[in-house]
Image (cartoon, rainbow, N blue to C red):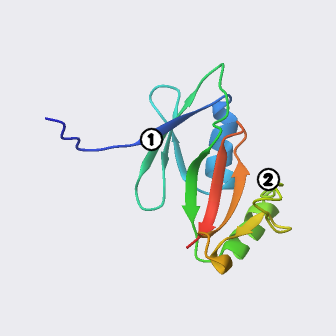
Amino acid sequence: MFAPVHGFSGFSVDDIAAAKAFYAETLGLDAKDGAMGNIDLTLPGGATVFIYPKPDHQPAGFTILNFVVDDIDAAVDELNSRGVVTKIYDDASFPTDEKGIARGKSVGQGPDIAWFRDPAGNVLSVLQD
């Protein structure tokens, strides 16, 4: 019988030191050195993520982590002040504003959301429900 007692996700990076600095210092998350040369990342709410080094890493072509915030404009401003670029998409069929925020909430097309990349090129998002 399949009866898991715990679950976690994982993704690769090409530079574990740069990833740890980004997740711990830039984003202010709980990122600890793991036993296998990895990073054990604990997200707000307690979920865990296994970040591992991979020499032939290819960035994910999709959003790997989503961070829900109360105020997307304040969160994007804070990320930008820390050197994080949130205007990574420029698509006329899915427009974002000057901050890189897709304002879906006001037009009934999902949450307000902005995407950004970690140092390995993986796509992350910040969103407001």
2 or 1: tag closer to the N-terminus: 1
Give the residue pinned by disc 1. 9
Which label was assigned to residue 89?
2
| Numbered disc total | 2
Q: Secondary structure at mark 2?
A: loop
Location of residue 34 with respect to 21 vertically, above or below: above
Per the model, the C-alpha gap separating discs 2 and 1 is 25 Å
From the viewer's perspective, is 123 left or right of 66?
Answer: right
Give the residue type that dot 1 points to. Answer: Ser
Residue 88 on image: x %, y %: 80, 52
Question: Within 10 Å of the Cα at label 1, are there few (<14), some (14-19), or many (20+) other Cα atoms?
Answer: few
Verify CB contact (< 8 Å) between mark 2 and mark 1: no
From the viewer's perspective, is 30 left or right of 1?
Answer: right
Name which residue lies at 62% across and 41% down. 20
Residue 118 falls in image quadrant: top right
Give the residue type that dot 2 points to. Answer: Tyr
Q: Quadrant location of the N terminus?
A: top left
Q: Which one is nearer the viewer's eye here, 93 or 123?
A: 93
Residue 72 on image: x %, y %: 67, 72
- Residue lying furthest right: 98
